[in-house]
Image: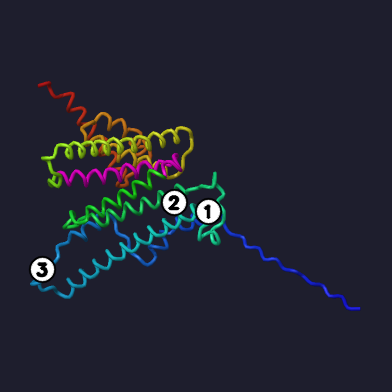
Amino acid sequence: TTTTTTTTTTTTTIRAPAEVCSLRLKSCRAFCEKSGTTVNQQDLEQTQTSPSPSPSTILSSEQKEQQQQRQRTMERHRSVLLCRILHQRLAVRSTEDSCSSSSLSGIVGESLLSQNGYYCDGEAVFYLGTALMEYADYCYAGNANQNKHDEMVLSTLNAASDCFRLASLVTPCDSRVYNNLGLVIGKIRGILLSERAQNKHDTSNDTANVNAMLLLSRYEEDQERAFRNGLNLLRRSMEAGCTSDNDRLHLESLSLNYGLFVANQDRFQEAVEILEPAVVLVVANDDSSTRSNDVFRLWQYCKNQCAAAIVEPDE
């Protein structure tokens, strides 16, 4: 008698949850920059504002090599920014699509944090907005013909603003979101002010002029609200003991940006009060970094302006 035993093997596919996939995509900076070269804002402006030689100018071989090197550096920087934008967009999609029957359903596992069939990774949206904002800076900084690029830059900045506004709804406890929201609104407002200064708007049209002023006023209010919300949130978190190693850096950044915004409106006493907590930390830690020095110098300048206003006799 012969007995045959049949064994059935079941293959089980275990997929990582959507948050893991999103985390991998959000951490793309090292990958994108592996074969690229990043430049800071100062280098970007210096490279883009370097005078282009006229056709009649005869360049030496060394000058030609330097010019080509600058062009290659800028092109690599652009590629890095676009790479980051695409990765962050995929990170946003990975969590959104995990809650629906999408083309990614066979790759991305179910979200662990979804509610009512919907989930959005606020940090992924924040990173996407940051990459878009940096790309807008790349397109705008030092461009000899900025007017030509205003529309594209504004569209990119508005997309970044939408990302930060969405992130503030999904992760309302992240002060970085409000800091960047304030920055991007300020960039949009700056371009609109530049357009008005160059008489792009028809000042003879009273309705259009009033609408433009109302829009600028709304942006100004939104910018201050973003900085104020972020700074208040960060201070309350630190007072409650919910701190991390980067909170001091975030406090300096938010205080500096908000302080500059207020000081530019000659509200020096308010600027002093905004900067005071950050200055205390700078002095206590004997920090000599560029940002810390900027915080201290702005605070000192605003204090001097307040003192001068008291000493000056009333006219």
| Magenta residues (range) | 167-196
**Front residue of this view, candidates 283 and 308:** 308
Q: Which three-letter amino acid code belongs to the residue tagged 1?
A: Ser
In the picture, measured across the screen, residue 89 lies left or right of residue 61, that is right
Which residue is labeled 1 in the image? 100
Q: Helix or strand or loop: what does disc 2 sit on? A: helix
Q: Which three-letter amino acid code belongs to the residue tagged 3?
A: Ser
Sequence-earlier tag: 3 or 1 = 3
Q: Is residue 185 magenta?
A: yes
Q: Is residue 113 above or below residue 227?
A: below
| Label 3: few (<14), some (14–19) or many (≥20) C-alpha neighbours in 10 Å | few
Which residue is labeled 2 in the image? 124
- At 12% from the left and 45% from the top, the residue drawn is 199
Q: Can you say which quadrant of the picture contains the N terminus?
A: bottom right
Q: Is residue 119 magenta?
A: no
Sequence-earlier tag: 2 or 3 = 3
Sequence-earlier tag: 2 or 1 = 1
Rendered image: mark on residue 54: 3
> Furthest-left residue in view?
56
> Furthest-bottom residue in view?
1
